[in-house]
Amino acid sequence: MRVSLTLSCVESPKAESSSPKDQIAMASSLLLRATAPARRLFHAARPTRGEACAAARRRIVVSVPPPAASAPPSPRRSSARRPAPADRIDRVESSRPASFSTSTSARASGGEAMAGGTEAPRVVEDCRGVLQVLSDGTTVRSAAAPYTVEDRDDGRVEWRDAVYHAAHGLGVRMYRPARREGKGKARLRLPVLAYFHGGGFCIGSRAWSSVHACCLRFAHELPAVLLSFDYRLAPEHRLPAAHQDAAAALAWLRDRLAPGPADGSGSDEDVRAWLADSGADPGRLFVSGDSAGANIAHHMAARFGAAGLDPVKTAGYVLVMPAFTSEAPTQSELGSRGSAFLSRDVAERYNRLALPAGANKDYPLMNPLGPDSPGLGPVGGRVLVVVGGDDMLKDNQVRYVDGMKAAGNDVELAVFAGKEHGFFSRGPWSETSGEVVRVVGRFMGRDAADSTGADGQD
């Protein structure tokens, strides 16, 4: 606002007899009286500090588009590149999900008073520093992962990104070992591993260095063609959004592994050709995940079983430290250390943000043995469950294995003594994680002789 003032001086009989000091005082008084209306108008038009903060938060909302479905990047050996070029975010992303609400008491307690009586938004939930929920419902996500791992992307594995769900902006990272020649110079047939990352359904990405490293090691050492899928995250998208996305991901993969015409999605033929050239065997699909991703893998087993993805054959499921909870605390939960990577406090935070309104830890997607769950039945394919001996979720994981066996499933249990939840994803290059890969390889190799390519090259 710009205000122009013109002051005209009217001579007063007193002016001639007054001193210069009195004349200055009189002029100042006249100036203040003349500008009072304009100053009142200016202050009335100024936004309060709270309004300014809200406007600033709205201005920093950033939408990061996924890789274009019509022009997916070409296969490459990426030893010279850091992971995640398709998902790199240079700014903070904020939003205010309609599903998130804070209680009146939470809003009233703490916080810093602002001009005009507005309370400054404060952090009410913090997930490892990369996800924060503010008291006004705003969700703020950081570009950085909570931890990084050594980059060993040395070209022994080729990988590329694609989009599997354009409407939700969801991507997949596809891996294959660098060409291994068999007889007749054809690429050897390899099992396919669909992989879902962990993060309490709230954080995580296929592009995080830890997830990327796990997939590199699996693809090279199993060996296998591996597809690492993203899914929508809470609290912007509470459960069952993640499981819905996983089902869509497997249907997308089925359509590109199975012989048949393209679906007209633009990149369909390119992805189909890449998988075929990789030696991906549609007769040996394994579904896997870590923590929240392992929870997803179980529910995909319950949903699809061995034949639900026909003509693709699901040979088995690999659950690495699955995130199963229960309303009644278990002994492993009660005995867990507060300083553990997954402590009771951290787990409760994930539950508050991921569960639907009104649900508790017996929610069927979180507790497959809970009172409202349909129960465990035959899933067709074999199941491997990897457990950390010091994981606070260990008791629920072991109960799950017992229940799956009682339902007639072929289940293997591998317990790694002294290991906490998340040891595989936080240390993918360690010797212990190497043993995890070998256990998974032996499990996947049990029925390799049952799937032989038409050219007999397996």
Image (tube, rainbow, N blue to C red):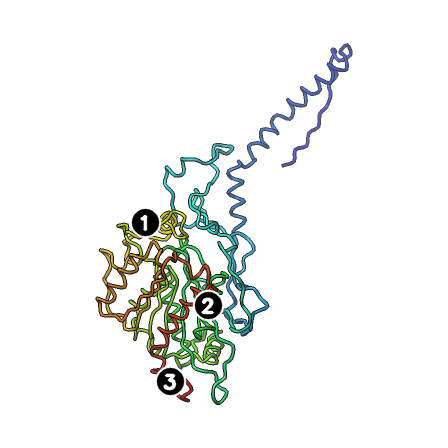
User: Would residue 52 be seen by someone viewing this image from the given angle?
Assistant: yes
User: Would residue 99 be seen by someone viewing this image from the given angle?
Assistant: no
Secondary structure state at the residue bearing disc 3: loop
Q: Residue visible at 35% across and 56% down?
A: 391
Vertical placement of residue 123 versus 307, above or below: above
Tag 1: amino acid? Gly
Q: Which residue is mark 3?
A: 452
Tag 3: amino acid? Thr
**In front of the other: label 1 or label 3?**
1
Q: Residue visible at 21% across and 66% down?
A: 406
| Distance in Å between CA atoms under marks 3 and 2 | 25 Å
* Residue 79, x across and y down, in percent: 57, 69
**CA neighbours of label 1 inside 10 A, class few (<14), some (14 to 19), many (20+):** few
Q: Which residue is mark 2?
A: 215
Along the polypeptide, which appears first: circle 3 or circle 2? 2
Q: Quadrant of the C terminus?
A: bottom left
